Image (tube, rainbow, N blue to C red):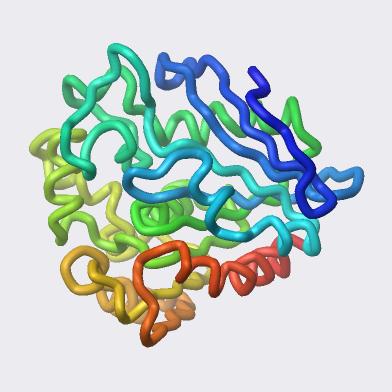
């Protein structure tokens, strides 16, 4: 692991790091906020959305003050593999910056786009080895594409995360343009492969989490075209999953929206990680 930067922040430290990933075959970057104290600390994974990096949530969400108060370690992974020889696309919603938190099976993406393996199988070991983290207490949250990642990873790996929440998540990518573009390119022509990375489809197929917290702005430009939280609401109702879906008038898709409600999410996770 290479330490890229480290600075004091709210009594703890915000740092950024890179390592040579065996999952992706590339150098991968991530951020860590370590709260004040000795630890070990419970870990909240914070997944960012399309076009974002490991710095986006750490810099824009304003979460460190609350994480310091609550004794939470925040981990902010990059959103895709990057670098020379890594497949890309000129569009913002495919390729570098748009990994969709899955393991691609189709060329030219399959050699490097293994985000599920990196996040679930590899990066936790690095966090455990180099930081005062308590990996028996993990939770996950995310925004937009990162909300999709938080929901699907929690549903696909029951017992890994004590709690899961999301800000304006893509809840049914097989039903909206972002997913209908990315999933076939990453995973091929089999609809069953797409459904394995669709939170609503996973719930309808029997996957479960204990409960969910989701915040959604009603002035979000992507609300009806790409996000469609009503699909998640219907699936959770049918499955008996307690869902707190808070709709907020006037709020859009930006980090101003996330800043406004991030404290609620951190406190919600902290209560379940205690």
Up/down of 273 relative to 128, above or below: below
Q: Residue 237: horizontal and vertical position, in percent?
A: 36, 81
Quarter containing the N terminus: top right
- The residue under the point 41% across, 84% down is 248
Up/down of 6 relative to 214, above or below: above
Asked whether the viewer can see residue 48, the reply is yes
Q: Residue 192: horizontal and vertical position, in percent?
A: 18, 46
Q: Residue 37: horizontal and vertical position, in percent?
A: 90, 48
Residue 234 left/right relative to 267? left
Quarter containing the C terminus: bottom right
Quick one: which residue is furthest to the right in this view?
38
Asked whether the viewer can see residue 134, the reply is no
- The residue under the point 64% across, 18% down is 2
Up/down of 185 relative to 256, above or below: above
Q: Residue 7: horizontal and vertical position, in percent?
A: 75, 38
- The residue under the point 50% across, 72% down is 213
């Amino acid at each position: 692991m290479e330490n890229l930067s480290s600075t004091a922040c709210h009594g703890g430290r915000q740092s950024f790091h890179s390592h040579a990933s065996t999952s992706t075959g590339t150098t991968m970057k991530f951020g860590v906020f370590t709260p004040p104290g000795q630890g070990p600390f419970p870990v909240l994974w914070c997944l960012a959305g399309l076009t974002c990096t490991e710095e986006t949530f750490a810099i824009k969400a304003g979460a460190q003050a609350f994480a310091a108060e609550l004794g939470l370690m925040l981990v902010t992974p990059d959103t895709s593999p990057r670098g020379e020889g890594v497949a890309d696309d000129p569009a913002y919603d495919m390729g570098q910056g748009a990994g969709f938190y899955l393991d691609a099976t189709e060329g030219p993406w399959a050699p490097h786009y293994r985000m599920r393996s990196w996040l679930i199988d590899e990066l936790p070991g690095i966090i455990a080895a180099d930081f005062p983290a308590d990996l028996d207490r993990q939770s996950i949250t995310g925004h937009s594409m990162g909300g999709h990642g938080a929901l699907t990873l929690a549903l696909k790996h029951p017992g890994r995360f004590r709690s899961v929440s999301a800000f304006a998540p893509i809840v049914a990518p097989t039903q909206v343009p972002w997913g209908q573009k990315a999933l076939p390119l990453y995973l091929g022509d089999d609809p069953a492969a797409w459904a394995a990375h669709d939170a609503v489809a996973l719930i309808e197929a029997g996957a479960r989490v204990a409960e969910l917290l989701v915040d959604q702005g009603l002035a979000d430009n992507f609300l009806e075209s790409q996000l469609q939280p009503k699909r998640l609401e219907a699936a959770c109702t049918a499955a008996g999953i307690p869902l707190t879906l808070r709709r907020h008038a006037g709020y859009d898709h930006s980090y101003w929206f996330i800043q406004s409600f991030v404290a609620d999410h951190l406190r919600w996770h902290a209560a379940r990680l205690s």
